[in-house]
Amino acid sequence: MATDHSELGIAMSPAVPAPGSRRTCQPRPLFVDQTAELGGAELSLRDIARHYAATGKVVLFTTGPLVDAMAAVGVHAVHLNAPAAVLELRREAGLGASLAAVWGLGRLVLRLARLGTGYDLFYANTQKAFVASALAGLVARRPVIWHLRDILSPEHFSRSILKLVRHLVRLPHVHVIANSHATARALLALGGKGERLVTIHNGIDPRPWAPIDLATLARLRGELRLGDRPTIGVFGRLAEWKGQHILVEALDELEDVQALIVGEALFGEHAYRARLDTVIERSGHADRIHLAGFRADVPALMQLCDIVVHTSIAPEPFGRVIVEAMLAGRPVIAAAAGGAPEIVDDGRSGMLIPPGDPRALAAAIRRLLDEPRLALQLAEAGRQRALERFGLDAALARIDAYVAEVLAKGRA
Ligand code: UDP
């Protein structure tokens, strides 16, 4: 049984086990993810898989930079070369593509089921990985935990996928960890079962976010050719719904600042990358917009910024970058939808603005630049809140407790 219930009727994170009560016999999860790119979901998975490195294994549907990122922290990730029909299935797919995907999925499920018999449970990290794992769990007679990191809405997923997910999450061997109340609410609205659903906010390892020395920051500033103007940073993959263009538009009202855009198009969102280039060119502000591409040194880059903004125009399932900016000790302005308001307490640990509103963003940036004491207060309170509420160790302890609960239910 989960130990607590929120006002939503969703079971809350199980209690953190007391120090010293850690099990000596760690469970063996088989982690499953459909991509091998370095998206937020995959970076979160890396931290969880590292925690279970002695007993677990990571299976990816394809290969990519995540394999090396896992290896760098001692996690062995294998990839299954899943059929293209499964990997490339898009929400607008026709009948032919859907039938090919079903056939490919069947073969994938059997391979996963075979692998799964050597493990205690399937731990699915993405939506296609969940569909395959839920079915493989039936074949291999293993429970499944889906770490849900998406807001399941018709904006992002096709009707048929949502229908399928609704059926699968109702199966008794399926359990769900939602990464925010917002993602949990969307699953319940779809027909998910509250009693097998917990909310565990993402945890971020604070160690890389310790203050960076001034010489390193000066070197980076030179490398990126950042001028002396105040720097407003936005971090995350380039995608329409992440709304980097909102910051570009906000510059119309902010003549004295420069923007640092960090991230790259990861999941087939290259058309947006091209559109962003055009928006920047037409804005007339290209000389004060710096596109840094995908970077592995986000902690240092965030510390170069005077303010970090989050500009998503659709509800953000969680928003690791928001917590990271708070850990970096920067004042944060975030778009108030999805998980963001669960992270930022408006006016106390950061500022919230309506999504998709460049004028509101410009006004919030102007206020923080004009009121440095307020900016400092928000940054300090933000760092404190991030450390207290969104630490990696606490999140891992809650995941441990939930995995144990799921396995105990299976044995009962
Ligand atoms: N990130 C990174 N390099 C980049 C841009 C982003 O390592 O150039 C990381 C960022 O630090 C964060 C993650 O990508 O940990 C994005 O996670 P978030 O939850 O904000 O968004 P998601 O990708 O899951 O939608």
Image (cartoon, rainbow, N blue to C red):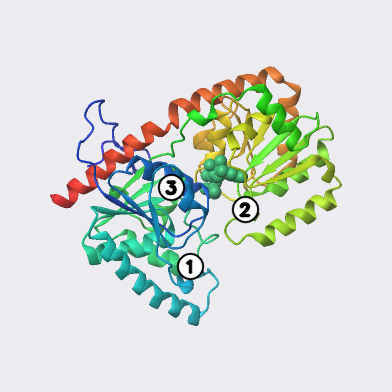
> How packed is label 1: few (under 14 Cα within 10 Å), some, or many (20 or more)?
some
Question: Which residue matches tag 1?
Answer: 87
The quadrant in which residue 103 appears is: bottom left
Report the front residue among 96 and 178. 96
Query: What is the spatial separation of the Cα atoms under label 3 and label 2, in whole angstroms?
Result: 31 Å
Q: Quadrant of the N terminus?
A: top left
Q: Image check: 119 left or right of 31? A: left
Q: Earlier in the sequence, mark 1 or mark 3?
A: 3
Q: Are marks 3 and 2 in contact (CB under 8 Å)?
A: no
The quadrant in which residue 231 appears is: top right
Which residue shows up at 60% across the image and 23% down it?
378
* Quadrant position of ligand 1: top right
Question: Which residue matches tag 2?
Answer: 241
Residue 13 in the image: above or below residue 33: above
Residue 140 in the image: above or below residue 395: below
Report the front residue among 23 and 191. 23
Which residue shows up at 46% across the image and 62% down it?
62
Q: Are marks 1 and 2 in contact (CB under 8 Å)?
A: no
